[in-house]
Image (cartoon, rainbow, N blue to C red):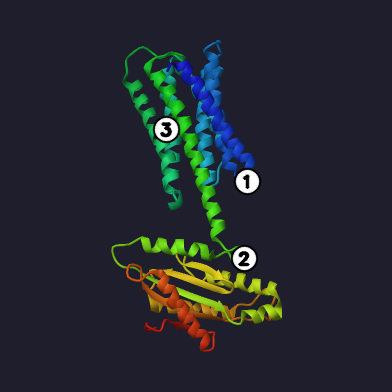
Amino acid sequence: MDSYTLMITTCLTAATMALTFFGLAAASRRETYLIMWGCAGLMFLCNSVLACIAFHVQLPYLLAPGFANTCTVLGYLFLLLGLRLYLRLAIQLYWLPLLGTLTYAVNLLPWTQIDVSHRILLNFPILFGLQTIIVLLLFRHRQPQLKKAYTALALVFILNAAQMAARWCYLLVDDTPGLTFLGSQLVQTLGRLAMFVFVLMATFACALLVIRRQELVLREHSDKDPLTGCYNRRALQRLLDQIEQRRPPQPQPLSLIIFDVDHFKHINDNFGHACGDQVLAELCLSIQQELRSTDLLFRLGGEEFAVALPNTQLHVASQVAERLRQRALALKLSQQPDCRISISLGVSAGFTNTRPWTELLKQADSALYQAKHLGRNQTLCYAETNC
């Protein structure tokens, strides 16, 4: 493939990148990072279009390669700014005019204008630095659910930075005559091929991040109870299965608590269903404050809830359950201060590799039934264990 064909192909790829992310941004107006990635595609497109025009028309140096190289640097900067927004990090937009002016000034230096290799030797360290920051961000803020997407994008930048470093080192030690801007020398042809591959793969990797995040958002909406914000029954099996499938070297304890609101029908009949909804919402909010970040709160249905406590033995789970009971007694509704509630709780515990969580759930439910039978507003452990 000759250099001109590579430039045309890169133009089409960069246009696809710009249209893809600008289109996604139009469909999701709150996601500003999509605009940044669309601007990155636009910068790469400007670089390639100027190079294609220069094949047919003699352009002033200020445009090609001066402005064209600046567009390339700004394209990488837009990718970095978009990634920071994706990671919910702050950005400083003054970097755009600052780095753009610096790059343009570097390309106007007399020594830089002499030869293409001189421009590569000065521009590549800027690009390498931007890509290093991007890779560090990806590894520093990686999330388990997005591990594959993060890894794919990091590999794109690592491989691209590696080829840049190889070309930079080659030009640093090479004694052959200087390169030409539109020449077909091997170094230039490989560079244009690398540019095409990078824009293509960066588009795919960034799109993968977008798709994966949307999948997680949709899953979260389907897994969460809209009234209380805790996990629903649909998420119960998947999340507890994940706990059991971890299979650490040593058996890990798992405790389950099941509780429900005492005389909940009485609350609905006397204060109204709106008050009943408020009870459930504020009770869950209060209970979440008592739990650890690794604990899981589920709404099983109606006024019945479950709490999964990983790496927690029975006596500790019993203490947690009692604190939850005390929180329910102390709860004062903001709109119905006369409505007071209590809860009954059942507790069970076991080890993930010896007793399935489904059995623990049945045991906790049995203990809850006993607590309600004995008068409610109390915590009971499963009868076959010592509490």
Label 1 residue SS:
loop
Residue 129 located left or right of residue 99: left
Residue drawn at x 58%, y 80% is 330
The first of marks 2 and 3 along the sequence is 3
Q: Quadrant of the N terminus?
A: top left
Q: Quadrant of residue 316?
A: bottom left
Q: Quadrant of residue 221?
A: bottom right
**In the figure, 340 relative to 153: above or below?**
below
Q: Please give the label number shown on residue 128.
A: 3
The first of marks 3 and 1 along the sequence is 1
The answer for how far apart the CA atoms under marks 2 and 3 are is: 49 Å
User: Circle 1 sits on which residue?
Assistant: 30
Residue contact between numbered discs 2 and 1, judged by CB atoms under 8 Å: no
Q: Amino acid at mark 3?
A: Phe
The answer for how far apart the CA atoms under marks 2 and 1 are is: 24 Å
Label 3 residue SS:
helix
Q: Is the residue marked by circle 3 packed among few (<14), some (14-19), or many (20+) residues within 10 Å?
A: some
